[in-house]
Image (cartoon, helix red, strand yellow):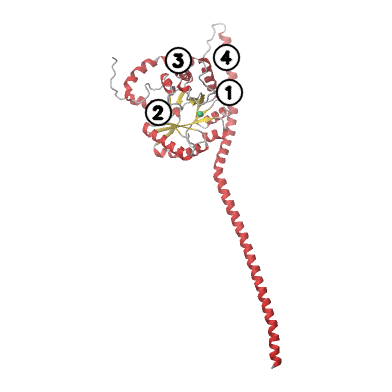
Amino acid sequence: VRKTSSSKPARKKPTAISQRAKNKRQAQQRQKRLLLALGLLFCVGLAAGGYSLHRVYRHLEETQNLAFAEKLAAERAQVEYQAAVAAYEAAKRKAQAAEAQHKARKEQASAHQRPVLAGKPAVDESPAATQAPTPVVHDKPATNAGARARGTQPPRPIDKAAFSRYTPSADKKLIALVIDDIGYQKSEGEATIALPGKVTVAVIPFSPHSKLLAELAFRQGQEVMVHAPMQPKQLKRWGQGLHTGLGEADFKQQLNAMLDETPHHIGLNNHMGSLLTENRQAMNWLMEELPKRGLYFVDSRTSPNSQALAAARAQGIPSVGRDVFLDHNRQREAIRQQFERLVAAAERQGSAVGIGHPYPETLQVLREKMPLLAARGIELVTVSELLNAKRARLTASAADPLPEFKSP
Ligand SMILES: [Zn+2]
């Protein structure tokens, strides 16, 4: 019994030790498994995190790439455009050569008769044409149309071949958008031209990309006008563009140089000019030149005392004033508010002109607002279309019986 009793604890001892060792081993194994699981979980978490980060990045990239895609499209258009320009230049050279040949032959033929008069008949005629009807047309409606807010005389039709023949329907409210300061930044200009609808692109003459962007705008079916730099009040030293220091000859020469430099333009508006547009003499010189090229005029209204519209109307030039500046404040929300003001002005007056700049904020607001105009009963038109429609409406309303006017 003793032996057995003594042998029991002896057998018990090693069992206890092995049990403890076994437990320890099991605990170690559990720990190891836990560590492995944690490691695995960590790896999975890392992968998931990485993937979602990648997705977020891709999303951001995609949204930002909208602008890039636009740029790409513009670049593609650019390539096509360059090819077209090359073809155009070749055709132009050919035509010039033919013209020179023709001229030489004509000169030879008329050498023994009498000297051929130099100068284009259109240029010689137009001052006479503007002067002749002015006193007659001016007197009557000026008194008759007293009730009408403005326009003492219906503007002359815009007759340049390049002008759109499109006439907006009579019951539609019209908005024309002018984007100023085009020519310094190529990408800005391209984004403006690519806006989803009609815009009138106001190009600064002699700016780095003026010619190219005017050409591109024209080819993309957008209207081009010259954005003529004029002296403002704020800047004391102002050497460029049109300023009060110029005499008549220099003023007109400078103006014509700007017009010659910018292809495809059919109108003009002022860049700055808060000082110069108050100068009636300078505005008269300006308005003497525009009819020679059949151009219209938009007063950017940088001064409340601008004489430009009065001078334009006195010459019978199709003209209109800016109603709303879209982006004096470049905040998107502010631009949206100004756009709504423009819509309200169009609804109130029948038509309205908004001027903006090719800032990314402005272009973004326009991209979002322009496509929604039609649904609001507003037609987006070019400035020439707006002027033609205004004239047609004015003529139509003049056909209504007006109170008879008797001269005293
Ligand atoms: Zn400007």
Please name the residue that numbered disc 2 is placed on: 389
- Above or below — where is 20 with respect to 125? below
**Could you say which is closer to the camera, residue 83 or residue 313?**
313
Give, as a three-letter code, the residue at label 2: Ala
Horizontal and vertical percent position of residue 401: 29, 24
Disc 3 CB within 8 Å of nearest ligand 1 atom: no
Residue 165 visible in image: no
CB atoms of marks 2 and 3 within 8 Å: no
Horizontal and vertical percent position of residue 92: 58, 23
Give, as a three-letter code, the residue at label 4: Lys
Disc 1 CB within 8 Å of nearest ligand 1 atom: no
Q: Earlier in the sequence, mark 3 or mark 4?
A: 4
Please name the residue that numbered disc 4 is placed on: 103
For the residues labelled 2 and 1, the Cα–Cα distance comes to 34 Å
Give, as a three-letter code, the residue at label 3: Pro
Horizontal and vertical percent position of residue 331: 49, 39
Please name the residue that numbered disc 1 is placed on: 92
Residue 127 bears which disc, if any? 3
Q: Which of marks 4 and 1 is nearer the N terminus?
A: 1
For the residues labelled 4 and 1, the Cα–Cα distance comes to 16 Å
For the residues labelled 4 and 2, the Cα–Cα distance comes to 41 Å
